[in-house]
Amino acid sequence: MAPLLESDAAPTRDRLSQTRQFKDGVHDYVHFSPWICSFIDTRHFQRLRYIKQLGLTYHVFPGASHNRFEHCLGVGHLARLMVMHLRDTQPSLGITDQHIVCVELAGLCHDLGHGPWSHVWDNIFIPTALPAKAKWTHEQASEMMFDDMVETYQLDITPEEVTIVKALIAGDKTRCVLGKTMPFLFEIVANQRNGLDVDKFDYILRDCQAVGDKGNLSLSRLINSARVINDMICYDIKDANQIYELCYTRFSLHKRIYNHKTTKAIEYMVIDALLEAEPYLKIADHVDKPKSYVFLTDNLLNKIEESSEKELEGARAIIERLRTRDLYKVVDYKVFSHADKNMIKENITPEKIVEVAKSGVLEGVDEELVMQLTPKHVAVNCSTLHYGRGEDNPLDEVAFYGKGNRDRCGKADYSDISLLMPSSFAEVCMRVYTKDGTFHGLVQAAYRHILKNLPATTPIEEVKDDDFVPENMASGASYNINLWTPPSDSPPTPRGFSRNPSAASIGETSAPVSAPAGRVSRSLGRTPSFSENQFTAVPPNFRGESPSRRPRSKRGRDVSDMVEDLRPRKSLRLSEQATATP
């Protein structure tokens, strides 16, 4: 049996005895003890009320107005349910009250370090503003804020418990003795083994509800299915499809909601505004100063807006564009395989797009615009979308057990779950933006020139030509063609592209094939390229709207269409007609 964290268990039991209720929109009433509430009732935790869970997604999905505060309450609640379920169903594990409150507190405080607009802060702003801290994470800040919270309010927690809680937040079982005796506890809040944890349980269900998605996920079923075998949290094989659905929902949320094209445009605008203000405000310098970091919230834009300093004029102009919906525009987009990720990031950049635009290889472009274009007018977003474990099937690292033997676990075979699994579990969504619509066509033409000349890194689908028949080949005759042979480490179902194979892409294997009458495969002997997006094509000299701060009506009419009292002329006519009607 695992030792207690404190010699006297009575105070800990008091921690669990009396509860305070919070009405949660996802889990209904959640209960926390007075001891847990002593951490909630601090400036550090209350700060999370002012940080949107989905960051700037709220500007696109108005329902996504929930904050990190309620998410953390939900994770703390689920963490307690999970660890108490394990204690009640498997008493031999030796889970004590101290273990329960440490896991619950870790779930509650796991997001203390999130900056303004959540992941926009640590994924984009900090690496750009502070390259020396490119690997800084909000988990590190959570530990910093937790330490400062304990010190500032002299909270009733032992140094040993502080160490355990921070290790649980990080999911790092090597940082304390408990990680050796009870490693399964470190899979509840931040599961580094397979990503299945109560943090994911809560945010997927909460985010789906916020944006209006109707999911079929049952968190109570998953929690009740959990069982510790071989020091790992395992699940009933009957719930394998439920877990797969959870992982797919994660991918779907990232693709449709978190990485929405307009959300990303707004994120780039906010980042540009912060970078404009950074030399004057030194915002990024607060990341390792808990006394000032505690005041960094989503209200940062409002503070810049209400300023009058000349140094912040550029930042205010960008925020004004955001308020009037004069957003950065998507020029083009494409989905690539995960294997192409590094090549795309290296070759499709604002600098290279501008370099091609100025190289003279583009036809039909406005030379005056070419002279004006700079990398600051272009943004390239490259987002990796996956099921939670990169290229791997998320179920590969999940251990399951069966009803017949609840103390034996193993990996499930595809035939135990479903044969309709995708051939790839990760992809890369790449978008090119222009910050000034005037350059729309020019930027797209330059990007497509780069795309056309990128080498293919995956198998290529042969193109049939109905018109080409060699003179020495009779209809129905047998002939030899070279077949592409995938390398041994290629996926079983190669991705096909609608382009012709070059000689370099053809393997050495030959096979006799019966030629259909009038049809034969041929190679044009050119380097294959990625196909262009046919739905976004515009002429090279196409100009969209340029950034403007003119007041506009909802339908985009100029001020000239308005009367003196700022009402549209049509509205005025309707008003006059209504007045004249007896």
Image (cartoon, rainbow, N blue to C red):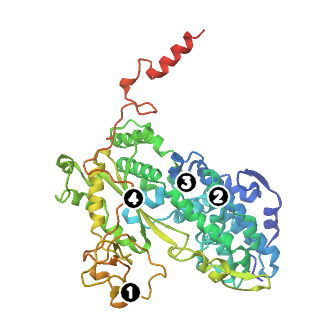
Of marks 3 and 2, which one's residue comes earlier in the chain?
Answer: 3
Dot label at residue 513:
1
**Disc 3 from disc 1: Cα separation:** 55 Å
**Disc 4 from disc 3: Cα separation:** 23 Å
Q: Are marks 4 and 3 in contact (CB under 8 Å)?
A: no
Of marks 2 and 4, which one's residue comes earlier in the chain?
Answer: 2
Residue at disc 3, secondary structure: loop
Q: Label 4 amino acid?
A: Tyr
Q: Which residue is mark 3?
A: 54
Question: Is residue 543 shown above or below 76?
Answer: above
Residue 442 in the figure: left or right of residue 336:
left
Q: Which residue is mark 4?
A: 333
Q: Is 20 or 520 nearer to us in this picture?
A: 520
Q: Label 3 amino acid?
A: Leu
Residue at disc 2, secondary structure: helix
Determine the image quadrant of residue 93. Answer: bottom right
